[in-house]
Image: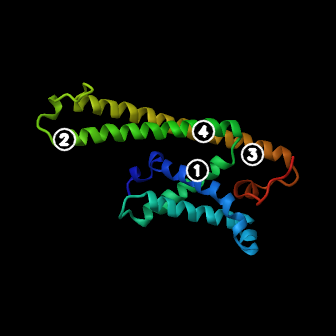
Amino acid sequence: MKGSDIKLNNLIDTIFLLFIGLGGGFIGGGLMNCSVQRFLKHPLGINGLLFLLLFFTCNFTSDEGTEIEVILVRTIILYALFILLLKNEYRMLIVGFVLLFTVYLLDIQIKYYQAVIDKEDGQDHVNHVETPDGFTEAGYLNKINDFENVRDIAEYVTLGVLVVGMGLYMNKQYNDHKGSFSLGKFIFGTGSCANK
């Protein structure tokens, strides 16, 4: 397993697919029998289903022949990241999503530049041939390097924003539930929200 197998930009597709999947869960809730609905409202059921959804989504978005160890590590990282996203102060969550989407867009652009280089590699004298937009392979490599640097910084900033947002939200929950606050319930949920 290589470090590049678990970088954040390799996991973003899964995060967005997960939100779509969870949004779709609101549709199916009334279709399941009552005992399944009760289990899925329990924190164990919710977190177990989340982990399975993440695992299958990671497998779905991975290259064919990816080792199970890589998929499992991706799943655990995504699970932790998703918990971090869900237990966040809403303004910081919005900023975090904007930053995460920016990382995603940067990754798309990097892949595009790499595809141009790969296409041009089949030609002779690639370093001297200009593409229609006026760049040589060396120019594309410089652009890729620049975008990778910005993406790496954006990943760290995103993580920082989400950690701070989680701290703010945890502080709010602690103050709202002074006598009954539990870190386990905060992280894994209770199955329902208090009406306020």
Question: Which residue occupies 45% across, 36% down?
Answer: 151
Q: To which residue does mark 1 refer?
A: 81
Image coords of residue 107 (percent x, y): 42, 40
Q: To which residue does mark 3 refer?
A: 170
- Amino acid at circle 2: Asp
Circle nearer the N terminus (1, 2): 1
Camera-nearest label, 2 or 3: 2
Q: Residue furthest left?
A: 124
Circle nearer the N terminus (2, 3): 2
Q: Nearer the viewer, residue 83 or 163?
A: 83
Q: Nearer the viewer, residue 152 or 43?
A: 43
Q: CA distance from mark 3 to mark 4?
A: 17 Å
Circle nearer the N terminus (3, 4): 4
Image coords of residue 100 (percent x, y): 54, 40
- Amino acid at circle 4: Gly
Neighbour tally class for label 2: few under 14, some 14-19, many 20 plus, Cα within 10 Å: few
Image coords of residue 123 (percent x, y): 14, 39
Image coords of residue 122 (percent x, y): 16, 43
Q: Please report contact status of discs 1 and 4: CB closer than 8 Å, yes or no.
A: no
Question: Which residue occupies 45% across, 52% down?
Answer: 6
Q: Please report contact status of discs 2 and 3: CB closer than 8 Å, yes or no.
A: no
Q: To which residue does mark 2 refer?
A: 121
Q: CA distance from mark 3 to mark 1?
A: 16 Å
Rendering quarter of residue 35: bottom right
Per the rendering, the mark at residue 96 is 4
Q: Nearer the viewer, residue 190 or 168?
A: 190
Q: CA distance from mark 1 to mark 2?
A: 37 Å
- Amino acid at circle 3: Met
Helix, strand or loop for disc 1: helix
Q: Please report contact status of discs 1 and 2: CB closer than 8 Å, yes or no.
A: no
Q: CA distance from mark 4 to mark 2?
A: 37 Å
